[in-house]
Image: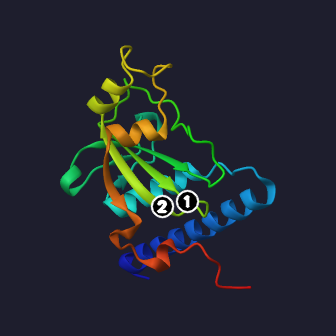
Amino acid sequence: MTTSNKVNMELYSIDKLMHETRQLAAKYRETTGSTLPVTGEIARFDVAKALSLQLIDDPTLGYDAMGTGDRQDLRVLIKGRVIFEDSRSNVRIGQINPDGRWDNIIMVLFNDDYLPVEMYEATSQDIETAISPNSKSKKRGAMSVARFKIISQLVWTREDGLSSEVWDNRSHSS
């Protein structure tokens, strides 16, 4: 098998695994009411694929991906949140370390089926201003999804035309 074929096979396998992970996570939540801790990995995969980022596999670096193209050499932290229909209105994105070694944060929002709906991007300066001691944030580094959306810019939506085969979470078997 040539290197090119091996890379294509690995990419297909990861696409397929992510598809199955989405299905499993959605079914698990539907059945138990609890969530599986897979949103972060799905977010990394989706953001890297949609925005042409190079994922970094070293969690000690403090960021998830390196930018390419328009984001060349930017260190990107990736956050993901599933917004369930029955979610309370003040969903948090989790703690953000303003002193981290990242340049931008990209937050992906998922629907109940763990499919990406929107992606927002904020710079470290946007984040620092939003979570500074003078801001309305009650806890340093804490931020709601709504606040993140206000300070960031929308960089991707589902309607932008991603392939339905890749992002389709419905099972084709009975």
Q: Residue at x 65, y 68 (%)?
A: 23
- Residue 19 vs 90, above or below: the answer is below
Residue 81 point in image, percent of width and height: 53, 48
Q: Residue at x 35, y 39 (%)?
A: 150
Residue that protrudes farthest toward the bottom in the picture = 173
- Residue 20 vs 102, above or below: the answer is below
Q: Residue at x 50, y 48 (%)?
A: 80
Label 2 residue SS: strand
Closer to the observer: label 1 or label 2? Answer: 1
The residue indicated by pointer 2 is: 116
For the residues marked 1 and 2, what is the alpha-carbon distance in whole angstroms? 7 Å
Q: Residue at x 39, y 14 (%)?
A: 133
Residue 102 point in image, percent of width and height: 33, 35
Label 1 close to label 2 by CB (< 8 Å): no
Image quarter of the N terminus: bottom left
The residue indicated by pointer 1 is: 111
Relative to 154, 117 lies left or right: right
Residue 147 point in image, percent of width and height: 42, 36
Residue 9 visible in the snapshot? no
